[in-house]
Amino acid sequence: MRTTLKREISLVGAGLHSGRPARLVLRPTDAGGIRFHRVDIRDRDNVIPARWDAVSDTTLCTRLTNAAGVSISTVEHLMAAFAGTGVTDAVVDIDGPEVPIMDGSAVRFSAEIFKAGLRRLEVPARAIRILRPVRVEENGASAELRPADGFSIDFAIDFADAAIGRQEKTLDMANGAFARELADCRTFCRRADVDAMQAAGLALGGSLDNAVVVEGDRVLNSGGLRRRDEFVRHKMLDALGDLALAGAPIIGAYSGVRAGHGVTNQLLRALFADLHAFEVVPLDAEAAASLPGVGAVLSDLREAV
């Protein structure tokens, strides 16, 4: 069955890139997947579907835009929280152009969803089963989906900064793995990049409170890292959020090498362009057990707030 929230969730926070405060309300719905509703816009269609084909920009974050030109940015962490807690249907009311960054991870979103609880819908759930490998490459980055019985993510990054370096990780995403292993891992950047972006009017809301900032071999945050390999884990979190824009859970294995939002979205576009690479199947109990949100509970979160 598909699932929605038992009650509304209200959150307030600033956007990472705009620095503008925004209020968002996550609302239950009886069907329709995930939809963003820009309540500050009233002169045109203000509903934006959370789908791969609505992605209009992947510079620094994932932005969705509808046919009327109304957009919402930085959706990836909230989408990861929905996928990682098992929410398939919800409406997100928001009064600004960007989802709040919170602490740079998905832990706040996930915690509030767990506290609200889930309600099953009388709507059959379906999944996207990968039938043959699909791969994209761009400028030394790559992403691939391969056939598998469940859903897994493996990722590799390689940065010149000694504080990050090369990191690799593979996770079977079944039985609450997202909540236990990824939800608390924060976005990260170089100090020089932050200075350059802010000088250019970008990342205006960025700070040590909502990102891990590195300089050479140093992590500048006073509390250090939450996990030794927090960097690659956050890239896995991003990948899950971007894959959630497929519109249904994926049964297959995702691999990313230096992949960002753009490469993962290209992968989904390549997948859906090849009708022989996937099939849409009923989500039976055995397949559902392999998904990130099944079996997850609030106590799985390391940084529950």
Image: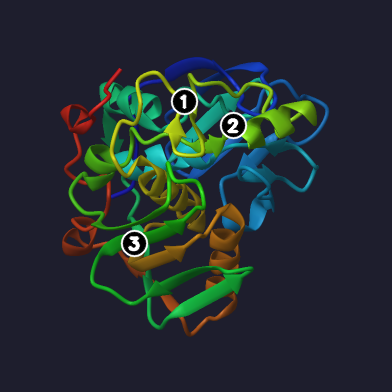
Q: For residue 220, which numbered disc appears in the image? A: 1
Question: Residue 5 is drawn in which quadrant?
Answer: top left
Q: Are marks 2 and 1 in contact (CB under 8 Å)?
A: yes
Residue under numbered circle 2: 191
Tag 3's secondary structure? strand
> In the rendered view, does 117 fall on the left or right side of 233?
left
Mark 1: amino acid:
Leu
Q: Position of residue 264 (x, y in %)?
A: 53, 60
272 relative position to 6: left or right: right
Q: Quadrant of residue 196?
A: top right
Q: Residue at x 61, y 27 (%)?
A: 16
Q: Earlier in the sequence, mark 1 or mark 3?
A: 3
Alpha carbons under labels 1 and 3: distance apart: 27 Å
As drawn, 299 above or below 181: above
| Foreground disc of the pair 2, 3 | 2
Q: Secondary structure at mark 1?
A: loop
Q: Residues within 10 Å of mark 3 (few under 14, many from 20)?
A: many
- Of the residues tagged 1 and 3, which is closer to the observer? 1
Residue 247 numbered tag: none
The image shows residue 58, relative to residue 222, as above or below, that is below
Compare residues 286 and 203 and report the one nearer the observer.
203
Which residue is the site of mark 3? 154
Asked if the residue at tag 3 contacts the one at tag 2, i.e. Cβ–Cβ closer than 8 Å, the answer is no
Q: Earlier in the sequence, mark 2 or mark 1?
A: 2
- The residue closer to the viewer here, 157 or 137, is 157
Identity of the amino acid at label 2?
Arg
Q: Position of residue 245 (x, y in %)?
A: 51, 52
Answer few, some or many: residues within 10 Å of disc 2's Cα (few below 14, many 20 plus, some between 14 and 19): some
